Structures are given as structure tokens and as C-alpha cells.
Amino acid sequence: MYRLCVVLLVVLAGCSGTGGTVGDGGESPTETVTPVPVPDADPERGRPTGIDGSGVSDPGSLAAAHDRRLGDRSYRLVSNQTVRYENGSIRSQYRVDLRLAANRTYLVTVRTDGPAGPRLLGDPPAVSEFWADGETYVRAFGTNDRTYNEFTPTASGVGTWRFWATTGVFDVRLSPPELIRESLEAVPTRIESTRSVDGGERYRLVDVGSPDAELPFPSASPARNVSLVAAVDRSGLVRRLELEYDGRIDGDRVVVSRSIAYSDVGTSEVRRPAWFDRAS
């Protein structure tokens, strides 16, 4: 995380930006509950999705199917990583709300919070917005007294759409497919129900009730009282994944939550932000 913060601080140097509320990534399609889950184990387009009648049979295949289904499609991605103390107060938080167009123009809002929150935007709480179309890169930093300017992505790609869609989703080098694969490798699941959403099947996956797990992520170890819920299309697209567990950090008991949520897949559009002229 330190290396990532250093790189981002280089990109963000000179900023000080933005308002806006990070959404929850939810959507309101027409849903019909099917009482008995009957997933189709046949792969879509000849490729495996990693799901069978008992749940996730191959987390790696599911993560790969998820990545393929997004391809060059537009979408909105909301991610959240929050660590709370037992009393509910935030120890650290990192939230990203990304809107990505088919032509890879993007608008992203990043928020940090908590005394142990990541410093990539400066001292938390902090918020920043970034917009880019592949040629022009602009940002707004701060809440009340915003600073606007242009920036240049790093040679490694920090600040590009690909960064925000992958390793920039969390404050550690962890992409959504990696979160999907590693979470489901560590936490056994079952299909709780099947829904028809806009004419397509969607499965609700839940953990099988095992209270402990050897999670590969930093923050709070060992993981106890592990809970996992996911919504997965028949094609393997993971619309939502929520992972929560208890643990200890520096002797303090905490609750760790990690989540990703995709919406507006194939329909998301991105326009210039209202503050574009002030930054360019």
C-alpha cells in the first residue's frame, strides 16, 4: 500500500478537491424470485463460468468470466474498503465510484476517511474527482475550497481508466477479479436463490456458514465471523460482492468490510464534469 500511496501522491501533487456523494452502485431492474436455484452449468459461449449447482466450483474461472464479460463495455463500479472499531467509528476507509464509458472516458470520485485511512489524497478525510478522455486529464480536489488542474498519468499508468478499474479500486494492489477469486477460494459458498433479472438468470451466493477463513488480504488477522454475499449473472459477471469479517489490528478488535458493485453495464455514459473549464 505504501508504494501505491507514494505513486498516487506524485500524481496528485499540487491538488487540493471535490464534492459529490459516492453512490452504492445499486440498480432497480425487474426481478422475479425463483424458489429453487437451478443454475445452468453449461458454459456461455463455450467458456466456463466457474458456477455449478452447488455454488462456485472454480473461483478462477468465475473471475476470468467476470473480466471477459466487462470487456470494452461501459459500467459503473462502486468499491468500498472500511475498517471499523467495535464502537462503530471508522478506523480507515477507501471508497471509489467509477463511471466508465465504452470509449474509456471516465469520471471517478475517490474518498478516504479515518485516523488510519490511506494518505494518497493527503490526510483523511479527503475527496477528489478525476475525469479523462484519454487525451485530457483533469481533477478537482477538496470539498469546500476546491483546487482544479490538469495532470499527467504516471509511466506505470496510475491515473488512467485502467488503473481506476483495476488496482486503483482498493488502497492495496488488488483488482476486482483478484478480490473475486481470492475471496471465493477462501470462503466456501452455496447458491441461496435464483432470480430472473430483466430476462436473465442471476444467482445469490452466500457463505456456507464457516465462521473462520484464511483470507489473503491485509487488515485484521486472523479473520473470524466471516460473511460473504454475492450476486452473479449466469454469464459469470459478478454484479456485487460483499465480504465482512472480524479481526484484530494492533490489539484492537475491528470489523473489516470489502465490497464491489457493478451497475449500468453497457449503458453508462460519461460527460465532462461541471468543473471541467476550471481545471483545463
Image: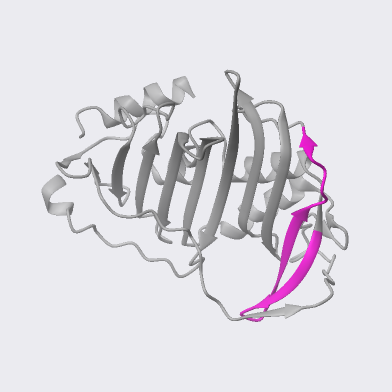
For the point 41% across and 34% down, which residue is it?
Answer: 157
For the point 77% across and 38% down, which residue is it?
Answer: 186
Q: Which one is in front, 94 or 40?
A: 94
Can residue 166 be seen from the camera position used here? no
Q: Please state the horizontal and vertical placement of residue 245, each as a whole percent of the image.
A: 66, 39
Q: Please state the horizontal and vertical placement of residue 9, each as a whole percent of the image.
A: 32, 26
The span picked out in magenta is 191-213
Can residue 18 be seen from the camera position used here? yes
Q: Please state the horizontal and vertical placement of residue 104, each as a whole percent of the image.
A: 40, 54
Residue 10, compared with residue 16, is above or below; it is above
For the point 70% across and 49% down, which residue is it?
Answer: 228
- Is 198 covered by the magenta stretch? yes
Q: Please state the horizontal and vertical placement of residue 130, each as a whole percent of the image.
A: 30, 46
Is 28 left, or right, of 99 in this rendering?
Answer: right
Q: Identify the colour scheme used.
A: one colour
Q: Which one is in front, 200 or 83?
A: 83
Q: Which secondary structure type mostly characterizes the magenta part of the structure?
A: strand
For the point 29% across and 46% down, which residue is it?
Answer: 129
